Amino acid sequence: MKIIKADSDNLYQLAELFDLYRQFYDQTSDQESALKFLSERISKKESEIFISLDGEGNASGFTQLYPYFTSVGMKRAWILNDLFVKKEYRKKGVAEALINAVREFAEKSDSAFVMLETQKTNTDAARLYERTGFKKDEEHFYFYLNV
């Protein structure tokens, strides 16, 4: 397995994964829009995306980070917004390898932290995050304003 930073050369592989990820969250398949969305993120440098490739170069998973800043810490931080592994590659260390790539990237970019959220019912993901060093926030409330 190899983890690489995705760029425009990986767009079609990435769009397939991204479309499957969105379907996992009950969204309608739309690879064309996925391709456009990801192309914009990459060309505008609005996110950092890592993709995992198996020994034959097939995409097995991805993660996408969005920049965030901490005023108190006066540093950049990252939101790990998306993490997805194709069904046939699950329980084989792909997600953990992607998280390790995120950790290494955050450390090298002198970031304050990486944060994420997951649904309370996604217990497999929660166990993975805790096992890889993420701590559950017990001190803050999070609020959302839908617009």
Image: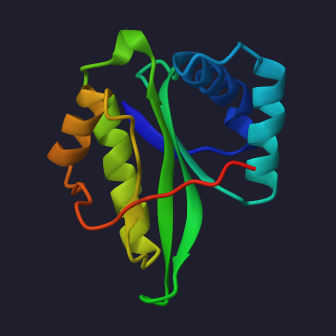
**Left or right relative to 37: residue 138:** left
Q: In this picture, is 43 found above or below 95?
A: below
Quadrant housing residue 33: top right
Q: In this picture, is 26 found above or below 135?
A: above
Q: Residue at x 72, y 37 (%)?
A: 9
Residue sitting at the far left? 131
In this view, the residue in front, 51 or 133, is 133
Residue sitting at the far top? 88
**Left or right relative to 105: residue 51:** right
Q: Residue at x 19, y 47 (%)?
A: 130
Q: In this picture, is 53 found above or below 48?
A: above
Total tally of numbered discs in the picture? 0
| x, y percent for residue 111 | 43, 75
In this view, the residue in front, 27 or 145, is 145
Q: Residue at x 44, y 41 (%)?
A: 3
| x, y percent for residue 147 | 76, 50
**Left or right relative to 90: residue 77:** right
Quadrant housing residue 27: top right
Q: Is residue 28 visible?
A: yes
Q: In this picture, is 17 found above or below 74?
A: above
Q: Is residue 52 visible?
A: no
| x, y percent for residue 58 | 52, 19
| x, y percent for residue 1 | 36, 30
